[in-house]
């Protein structure tokens, strides 16, 4: 993109990436712009080095991950191929189904749009509920993360989470913060009865209201 400052910081999807200094977008002959791209963690700092000014072009830089982090199957991949990059779990996933089946491709993407187990926060609550609109129930563990017995329940859930991927949205939450209390009220969970597991689905009447369908 553009920048009014000589430097611009951008967030990368994960750490361990490298970015080229040379623009990937086409350059006009009369553009003198040259750039430096420095990565620290998952932050990319782009600096214009030919002048102490910003830039007006819609700058694009090519970035890639560390080859050492690539899975074993990557070197033998055959094209055409569909892969999904994400900042969580395995980072890079290969779709092995029918490339002409939109429903299967959508299922592959939906199963990986969130981490296998997601902490329920004010920032991602809307994303969790929106994902469940795709006919995926929400499986929620309400626990006290400082209680050893509760942590054991969370460990068991995380161990089973891979097998449940694509079948439900899995989230874990406490019960003390305001956003957590709203969730426990929706699920009918009382703090003295923790840890508790609930599965929540959209109201079948189609009003996009939720109800706790099952409790464990």
Image (cartoon, rainbow, N blue to C red):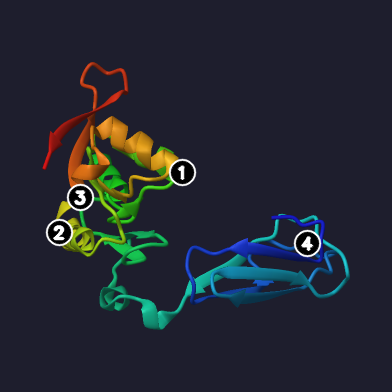
**Disc on the earlier residue, 3 or 1:** 1
Based on the displayed image, in which of its 4 quarters is residue 68 positioned? bottom left
Q: Could you give the CA–CA distance between mark 1 and mark 4, rounded to whole angstroms?
A: 45 Å
Q: Could you give the CA–CA distance between mark 3 and mark 1, rounded to whole angstroms?
A: 21 Å
**97 or 35, which lies in front?**
35
The spot of residue 193 in percent (x, y) is: 19, 43
Q: Pointers 3 and 1 in contact (CB under 8 A)?
A: no
Q: Does residue 177 lie above or below 188 as drawn?
A: below
Q: Could you give the CA–CA distance between mark 1 and mark 2, rounded to whole angstroms?
A: 25 Å
**Disc on the earlier residue, 1 or 4:** 4
**175 or 187, which lies in front?**
175
Q: Which mark is residue 160?
A: 2
**Disc on the earlier residue, 1 or 2:** 1
Label 2 Cα crowd, 10 Å radius (few <14 / some 14-19 / many 20+): few
- Find disc 1 in the rendering and name its residue: 122
Q: Pointers 3 and 2 in contact (CB under 8 A)?
A: no
**53 or 75, which lies in front?**
53
- Element class at badge 3: loop
- Element class at badge 2: helix
- Find disc 3 in the rendering and name its residue: 195
């Amino acid at each position: 993109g553009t920048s009014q400052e000589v430097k611009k910081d951008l967030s990368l999807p994960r750490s361990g990436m490298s970015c080229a200094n040379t623009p990937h977008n086409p350059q006009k002959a009369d553009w003198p712009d040259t750039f430096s791209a420095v990565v620290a963690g998952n932050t990319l700092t782009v600096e214009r080095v030919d002048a102490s000014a910003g830039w007006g072009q819609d700058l694009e830089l090519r970035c890639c991950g560390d080859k050492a982090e690539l899975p074993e199957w990557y070197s033998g991949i055959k094209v055409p191929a569909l892969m999904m990059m994400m900042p969580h779990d395995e980072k890079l996933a290969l779709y092995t189904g029918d490339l002409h089946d939109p429903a299967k491709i959508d299922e592959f993407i939906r199963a990986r749009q969130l981490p296998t187990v997601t902490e329920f926060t004010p920032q991602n609550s809307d994303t969790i509920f929106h994902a469940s609109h795709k006919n995926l129930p929400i499986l929620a563990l309400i626990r006290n993360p400082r209680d050893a017995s509760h942590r054991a329940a969370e460990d068991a859930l995380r161990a089973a989470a891979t097998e449940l991927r694509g079948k439900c949205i899995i989230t874990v939450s406490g019960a003390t913060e305001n956003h957590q209390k709203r969730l426990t009220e929706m699920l009918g969970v009382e703090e003295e009865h923790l840890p508790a597991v609930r599965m929540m689905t959209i109201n079948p009447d189609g009003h996009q209201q939720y109800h706790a369908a099952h409790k464990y």
